[in-house]
Structure formats: C-alpha cells, structure tokens
Image (tube, rainbow, N blue to C red):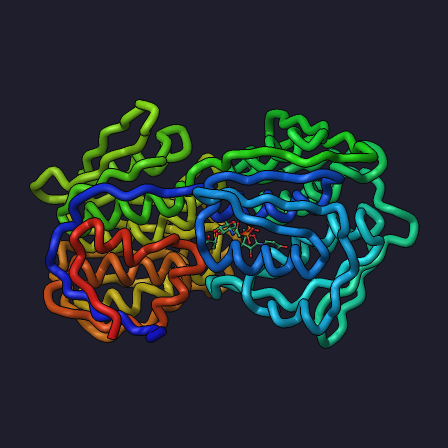
C-alpha cells in the first residue's frame, strides 16, 4: 500500500470515535503471559503494529496465540521453547518491547536472546537501567553482533535496587523478573504510571504478590508458579490526548468513547488552562467529549514529567494546539532529550517555535547542562499552511497530522504507516470525524 497521504486542512473535526486498550500496557501484558503456566486472555487489544510484533515474538517462542471477537487475544504458554536467533532477528529494530522478554525467558528457559531494539528516535534511549537490574537478579549478559544473550547460571534472586530515574521500561523489567525470582525484591524510585499499575493488576491476577508503597517504592515477593490472567486493559490515554488536541487545533468537537477521566487528570487541567472545553460521561458507554469553545486559546508554561506529571507523549500534540494560542507558551521536556525534532515541520508550516538548550522551567532536569534542545517557546497564533511532511516518530507524526488538519491548503504526508504502530484504524477514525484526505 502507498505510504503517502494527502490531507486537505482547514476543516474542524467533528464526531465520535472509540479508543481501545493502551498500547503501552497491552504489549507488556502480552509479555507477562509467558510467565504463566496456563492460558491468559486479554480483551480490547488494538490492531496496531506493536501488538503484531510482540505476537510474532511470542509465537517464535512457542506461545500459541489465537483471536476471539472484538479485540480478544488468547495466549497459551504451555509449550514455551527456545526460539531461533535468525527468526528473532526478523523483528530487530521494530520495537522496544523485546527487552522485556529477558526476565520471563530466563525463568522459563534459563536463557534469553534479545534482538537489537527499535522504537521511536526521540533520544538515545539506552537500556543501562534494565541491564543493571538484571545483573542484580543474577543474570549474566553477553553482547554479540546479533543482539543480547542472557543466562542466569545460579537462578534469579530477589534484590534491593534503586533506579537512577523512574523509568517505565526498567520498572516493568524489574516487575516481570521479580515476580518469579526467589525471595523479596524492593524497587526504589520506581515509575508509577497508570500502565504500570495496570501491569501489576495483571501480575496479581496471575498469582504475584506486589505492593506499591509511598515514595515510589514497589515490593515484590517472588512466587514459584504463576497462572494465566483474564484482563481488560486501561484505555489508551496517549491516543485520547492526541484526538483531544486535534479537536482543539481544528476548532472541532470530538467525543472519545472509552476515555477515562482518572487516567487523564493532568492532561485535562492543561487542556482547560489552554482554553479547551471537555465533558466527562460516566455512563456505561463512558467517554470524554473535547471541543474548542470559540474565542482565543490561552498560553501556558508546561513541563513534562513522570507520572503524575504531564506525560511526555502528550507534549507533541499539545504543542500543535499551542501554535494557535495568543502569546508565548513555554514547554520544558524533562523525560526525553530530543523530543522537539517534530517542530521543524511546524515551523515550515508557519508556526513560530524557538528551541533552547536551557531548562525553561522550575525543574532543573538531566538535560540542562548537556547541550540538548529540550525547551521550546511557541509564539502564536500562527496561520499554518499545508506542505510536504515526513512522519518522524509515532507521536511527532500524529502531531504533524493534527497540524496538517488545522492548516490552510493541502499537505502531503510521507511515511504515514508509522502511525499504525500505535493508532488503530486512524484513517477510519479520521474519516468518521469528517477529515478530508486520500491515499495517493
Ligand atoms: C515508555 O518508554 C513508553 N513506551 C513511551 O511511549 C513513553 O514515552 C515513556 O515510557 C515515558 O512515559 C512504551 O511503553 C513501549 P522510560 P520507555 O524508560 O519505557 C531514560 C510511545 O510513543 N532511560 O521511562 O522506553 C530514557 O532514555 C512511547 O508510545 C535510561 O537512561 O521510557 C528516557 O530519557 C514513546 N536508561 C527516560 O529514562 C534506561 O535503561 C524515560 O524512559 C531506560 C531509560
């Protein structure tokens, strides 16, 4: 299929769409199924490429994966086996999830091979925290040209470990390893994103004993056996925010079924401060309606942070909406060092955005002294005009979409299939919201 989309901007988005389970929980819950000795069932799984990649990796390790109706996936891990390195390498560079296979494979097979990782290019994205944690549990790694080989000759044992930064992935690594390690693990400075709490719920359903304490401490009592789970994931709060910003930037009105207020509170505060309106529907067919109430949007000063702060993945769509606010907005990105690359395209479309190496916010962050363009000043409102765009990464790419929809004239977006990594049926959703676009 052609990877190029022509988007005709200037039309407010209007209508209703539905989001499914969160990409950043679903993929981890799929990995967790490897730890069980019986069948697991995950509902509301979105049809996105990251799910296909994890499914492929599970199948290469002997997990039988079958589909039910309406996004149900069933995992049978009764025949987990060592996978062929060449076959695994087909998935090299396609996602960051493979690194989370380490603990489960070490428990099941005593050996793990992890192909080179992929994922969005939004910073260096090292895996040093993952590897130090695995070493603490007793794993030994060997890096070869094909990827990473791990063994645990003395078995995996509970440990006390403090993360240098509350990394989402490294916290998940510790959880997925500690649940079946011998003894107790205490993780300090853990990430506590809602997706992590939901993963803990999945593991608890499987038989794990995990307690979350104040001050980012998670305690895990290892157990020798885990069963399967049946789980309905939390909704994709990253996707919800993307559509909310699209509604705001295009002067539209979009109801997102499946969205939950509790996952979105920090975002909703910012959305309201900027001048957006929203209404929460708590009925069984729950959702949140987001719209532009008319008048000028207001400027804000924002800093991204780990939960419960403003998510880094919300930053990019918000920046597009801020190009339409009256005056100067400031955004300080403190999670990834290179997450403003997508603004070059916005500037090409007519936005006024200046990037700075300094920390333009109250929190001095890890990138302040290190020469990274990680603060942005956005001056608006700017009339955006259509142009030629190349999708750089998942959230940045969706933000280009939003800009193209808000712009006057037409834009040609190259590399749109990258959006399928994390947004299910995005073209059908755009269609449902009255966007004008075509594949060319
Ligand atoms: C997860 O990435 C998400 N991905 C990201 O979403 C999300 O932006 C991020 O968490 C923060 O919420 C998935 O869940 C698949 P981190 P992850 O480890 O786990 C540094 C999307 O678009 N770090 O919390 O990779 C790292 O470089 C994606 O859906 C180390 O230095 O993020 C970053 O600066 C993009 N060493 C910071 O920590 C390590 O070993 C936070 O990263 C690990 C991380």
Residue at x-position 30% and y-position 73%: 4
Query: In which quadrant will I find the C terminus?
Result: bottom left
Which residue corresponds to the image point at 19% horizontal and 46% vertical from the top-left? Answer: 248
Viewed as shown, does residue 319 lie left or right of 113? left
Residue 104 visible here: yes
The answer to whether 101 appears left or right of 82 in the picture is left
Camera-side residue of 372 and 90: 90
In this view, which residue lies farthest toward the top?
283
Image location (x, y in percent) of residue 415? 36, 72
Which image quadrant for residue 222?
top right
* Left or right relative to 34: residue 255: left
When asked about the image quadrant of residue 301, the answer is top left
Does residue 362 appear in this view? no
The location of residue 103, given as percent across then percent down, is 74, 49
| Image coords of residue 339 (percent x, y) | 41, 60
Residue 170, percent across and down? Answer: 64, 48
């Amino acid at each position: 299929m052609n990877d190029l989309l022509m988007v005709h901007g200037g039309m407010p988005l209007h209508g209703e769409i539905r989001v499914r389970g969160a990409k950043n929980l679903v993929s981890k819950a799929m990995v967790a199924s490897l730890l069980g000795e019986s069948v697991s069932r995950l509902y509301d799984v979105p049809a996105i490429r990251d799910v296909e990649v994890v499914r492929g990796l599970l199948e290469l390790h002997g997990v039988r994966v079958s589909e039910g109706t309406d996004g149900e996936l069933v995992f049978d891990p009764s025949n987990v086996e060592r996978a062929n390195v060449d076959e695994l390498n087909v998935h090299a560079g396609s996602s960051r999830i493979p690194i989370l296979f380490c603990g489960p494979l070490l428990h099941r097979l005593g050996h793990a091979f992890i192909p080179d990782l992929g994922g969005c290019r939004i910073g260096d994205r090292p895996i040093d925290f993952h590897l130090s944690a695995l070493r603490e549990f007793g794993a030994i790694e060997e890096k070869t040209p094909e990827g990473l080989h791990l063994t645990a000759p003395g078995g995996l044992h509970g440990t006390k470990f403090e993360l240098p930064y509350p990394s989402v992935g490294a916290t998940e690594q510790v959880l997925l390893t500690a649940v079946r390690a011998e003894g107790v693990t205490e993780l300090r400075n853990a990430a506590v994103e809602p997706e992590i709490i939901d993963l803990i719920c999945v593991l608890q359903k499987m038989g794990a004993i995990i307690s979350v304490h104040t001050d980012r401490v998670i305690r895990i009592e290892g157990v020798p056996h885990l069963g399967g789970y049946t789980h309905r994931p939390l909704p994709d709060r990253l996707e919800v925010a993307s559509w909310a910003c699209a509604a705001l930037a295009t002067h539209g009105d979009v109801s997102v079924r499946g969205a939950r207020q509790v996952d979105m509170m920090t975002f909703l505060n910012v959305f309201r401060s900027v001048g957006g309106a929203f209404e929460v529907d708590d009925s069984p067919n729950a959702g949140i309606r987001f719209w532009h109430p008319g008048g000028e949007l207001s400027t804000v000063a924002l800093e991204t942070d780990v939960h419960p702060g403003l998510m880094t993945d919300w930053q990019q769509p918000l920046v597009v909406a801020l190009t339409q606010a009256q005056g100067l907005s400031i955004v300080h990105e403190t999670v990834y060092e290179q997450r403003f690359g997508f603004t070059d395209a916005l500037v090409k479309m007519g936005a006024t955005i200046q990037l700075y190496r300094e920390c333009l916010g109250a929190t001095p962050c890890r990138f302040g002294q290190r020469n990274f363009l990680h603060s942005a000043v956005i001056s608006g409102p700017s009339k955006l005009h259509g142009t030629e765009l190349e999708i750089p990464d998942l959230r940045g790419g969706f933000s280009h979409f939003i800009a193209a929809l808000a712009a006057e004239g037409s834009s040609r977006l190259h590399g749109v299939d990258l959006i399928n990594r994390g947004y299910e049926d995005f073209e059908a959703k755009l269609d449902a919201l009255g966007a004008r676009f075509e594949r060319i």
